[in-house]
Image: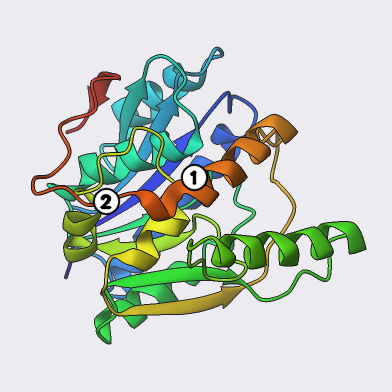
């Protein structure tokens, strides 16, 4: 059985994390019981420079249960950097990673399907929204335009895929060759040249708290997508993130 690390970026999640952490833990237990994940599998919570009690919650979870581990970034680095920091930390510890947002809008039960797709030979498995029926007409239309524009500028994106994905060690090793300080992960993973599969799921409302993606951050992410086609892999893996202020591992 392979060691799985579930990588969860967190930013000011004092409302959400206490409710969703037990759900991540139960899913890890179910994956282990089903033979899809090994006994050394972990939930890696990445605190992206939160200004609230998020890191104290992560520390408490770790102290009460070694299946929870943590990284604290300082200062706030942004969602994509937080995910990348978690993936690169897990790269030397895990055989497989699955990144997912803490709010559980992405269906956590799709992880089992991802692990099975990986067992069938996929190095990358992307979670894809089954539909956008719950979105407004404006949001559906702008999303379609966004993906079309990204592809036009060379960022070959998977439609309706954000950052819910499985990456195995081979994919992580290739991803580590990109040293960009502000990565656009959904654009980079399609450039790794590895077998990729998709799993559909239904997106649901946040469990608690509020979305941290402001309009300004969304525009910045879109602009980053337009330039990600210029990113070039280096000959050596990226160095450890200097913004990691603290680590919690058992």
Name the image quarter holding the N terminus.
bottom left
Instruction: Please give the residue where the numbered disc 1 appears in the rendered image.
Output: 22
Is residue 56 placed above or below 240 in the rendered structure? above
Q: Residue at x 58, y 42 (%)?
A: 223
Q: Of discs 1 and 2, which sits in the foreground? A: 2
> Upstream in the sequence, badge 1 or badge 2?
1
Q: Residue at x 41, y 55 (%)?
A: 229
When asked about the image quadrant of residue 35, the answer is: bottom left
Say which element carries label 1: helix
Instruction: Please give the residue where the numbered disc 2 appears in the rendered image.
Output: 232
Name the image quarter holding the C terminus.
top left
Say which element carries label 2: loop
Is residue 124 placed above or below 250 in the rendered structure? below
Residue 80 vs residue 160: left or right? left
Is residue 201 placed above or below 250 in the rendered structure? below
Pointer 1 and pointer 2: residues touching (CB < 8 Å)?
Answer: no
Where does the image place residue 22, in percent across and percent down from the top left?
49, 45
């Amino acid at each position: 059985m392979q060691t799985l690390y579930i990588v969860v970026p967190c930013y000011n999640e004092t409302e959400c994390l206490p409710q969703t952490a037990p759900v991540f833990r139960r899913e890890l237990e179910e994956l282990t019981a089903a033979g899809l994940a090994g006994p050394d599998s972990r939930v890696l919570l990445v605190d992206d420079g939160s200004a609230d009690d998020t890191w104290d919650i992560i520390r408490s979870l770790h102290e009460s249960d070694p299946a929870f581990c943590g990284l604290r970034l300082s200062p706030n680095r942004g969602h994509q950097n937080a995910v990348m920091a978690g993936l690169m930390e897990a790269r030397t510890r895990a055989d497989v990673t699955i990144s997912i947002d803490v709010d559980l809008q992405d269906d956590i039960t799709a992880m089992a399907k991802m692990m099975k797709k990986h067992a069938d030979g996929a190095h990358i498995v992307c979670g894809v929204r089954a539909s956008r029926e719950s979105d407004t007409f404006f949001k559906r239309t702008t999303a379609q335009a966004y993906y079309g524009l990204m592809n036009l500028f060379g960022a070959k994106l998977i439609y309706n895929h954000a950052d819910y994905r499985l990456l195995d060690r081979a994919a992580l090793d290739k991803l580590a060759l990109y040293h960009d300080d502000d990565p656009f992960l959904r654009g980079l993973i399609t450039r790794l040249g590895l077998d990729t599969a998709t799993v559909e799921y239904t997106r649901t409302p946040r469990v608690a708290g509020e979305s941290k993606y402001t309009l300004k951050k969304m525009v910045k992410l879109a602009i980053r997508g337009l330039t990600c086609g210029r990113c070039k892999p280096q000959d050596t893996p990226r160095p450890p993130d200097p913004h990691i202020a603290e680590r919690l591992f058992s």
